């Protein structure tokens, strides 16, 4: 019969458990799986500093040959400090839950307890993945948000920038003007590229995540349908395209699928959120864990460990931690829209 002493082995050390997390399955979200969206930024401290430079290009006035060239004005710099946040959850394994675990066949008590710990880790990891997706959804709107919707950092305020006002795509117009949707797309693309101030160069891609009503009206719009019918994907118009993606007007549009309850993680049904991918403006800072095992080491995405009951030897807590801070350095390059 397994006992609580089994948790004293190396298999359940913080280092071993944190390392095993990468081997567990998880439930990814759309933003978590979008290549090039976020740059990982591990740090050795609990705070980060972001330096901003005013280094926009400037026109050079002509001068006479032989004259001393005008001297370039020095760059103005600002450094701002921010604290990473803590995400933590635990799952308690009671002694009575291990009472009936016995070795049989080729399985040892240790192997079976490891399976139970891994199962608890998997359940917590699903919650952490959902939390990360929620943070990314806030990030592409220029904010670091908490689980309750409160704003930890408003990056537009922090960096003294402004996100362009929401535009009306007027997708339900009875008699839309010719090419009106493409003109709206051009407006969005220009605003985003201008807001990037050259970051990302030619490798920037513009993405939009849409609520259900916005998506349905966009894909049903006569202008979009006429263009779509000329492509190999025309059959999708007959089969439906909920929670899928397509390209139009220089933008990759995606019908964002949030949580099934329609309230926890979502894009409002009549809205669309635009953001650049490949520009490097979204960063995911990661601080090291709290235990001595990780002092002064580079932060990693997740940490896990087991804490046992030292007094009564009656339970063990499987714990999971993360110390991230999602940062948007150029919130002025974001955009938003409504369907009407």
Image: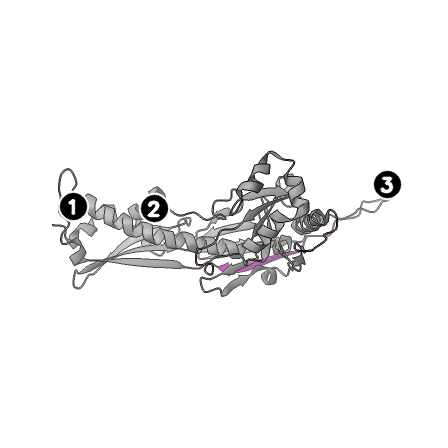
Residue where numbered disc 1 is placed: 109
Decide if residue 209 is on the left or right side of residue 10. right
Mark 2, residue position: 21
Which residue is disc 3 drawn over?
66
Q: Secondary structure at mark 2?
A: helix
Secondary structure of the residue carrying tag 3 is: loop
Magenta span has 49? no
Percent x, y of residue 296: 39, 51
Q: Callout 2 environment at 10 Å: few (<14), some (14 to 19), or many (20+)? A: some
The alpha-carbon separation of the residues under discs 3 and 2 comes to: 66 Å
Residue 71 among magenta residues: yes
SS of the residue under disc 1: helix
Residue bounds of the magenta highlight: 70-86
The alpha-carbon separation of the residues under discs 1 and 2 comes to 21 Å
Q: Quadrant of the C terminus?
A: bottom right
Residue neighbourhood size for the residue with mark 1, other residues' Cα within 10 Å, grouped as few (<14), some (14–19), many (≥20): some
Give the Cα separation between the discs numbered 1 and 3: 86 Å
């Amino acid at each position: 019969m397994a006992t609580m002493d089994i948790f004293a082995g190396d298999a359940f050390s913080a280092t071993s458990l944190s390392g095993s997390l990468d081997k567990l399955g998880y439930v990814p979200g759309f933003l978590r799986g979008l290549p090039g969206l976020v740059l990982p930024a591990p740090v050795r401290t609990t705070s980060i500093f972001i330096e901003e430079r005013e280094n926009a290009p400037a026109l050079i006035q002509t001068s006479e040959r032989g004259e001393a060239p005008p001297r370039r004005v020095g760059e103005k710099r600002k450094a701002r400090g921010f604290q990473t946040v803590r995400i933590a959850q635990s799952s308690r394994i009671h002694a009575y839950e291990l009472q009936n675990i016995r070795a049989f066949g080729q399985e040892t008590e240790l192997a079976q307890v490891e399976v139970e710990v891994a199962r608890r880790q998997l359940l917590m990891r699903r919650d952490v993945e959902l939390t990360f997706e929620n943070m990314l959804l806030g990030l592409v709107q220029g904010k670091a948000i908490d689980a309750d919707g409160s704003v930890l950092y408003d990056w537009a305020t922090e960096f003294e920038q402004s996100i362009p006002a929401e535009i009306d795509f007027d997708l339900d117009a009875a008699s839309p003007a010719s090419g009106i949707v493409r003109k709206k797309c051009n407006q969005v693309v220009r605003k985003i590229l201008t807001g990037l101030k050259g970051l990302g160069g030619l490798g920037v891609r513009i993405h939009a995540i849409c609520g259900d009503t916005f998506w349905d009206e966009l894909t049903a719009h006569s202008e979009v349908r006429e263009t779509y019918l000329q492509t190999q994907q025309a059959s999708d118009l007959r089969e439906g395209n909920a929670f899928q993606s397509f390209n139009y007007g220089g933008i990759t549009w995606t019908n964002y699928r949030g949580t099934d309850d329609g309230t926890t993680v979502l894009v409002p049904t009549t809205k669309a959120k635009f953001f650049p991918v490949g520009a490097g403006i979204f960063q995911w800072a990661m601080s090291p864990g709290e235990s001595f095992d990780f002092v002064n080491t580079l932060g990693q995405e997740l940490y896990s460990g087991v804490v046992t009951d030292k007094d009564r030897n009656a339970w063990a807590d499987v714990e999971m931690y993360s110390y991230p801070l999602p940062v948007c350095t150029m919130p002025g390059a974001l955009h938003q829209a409504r369907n009407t």
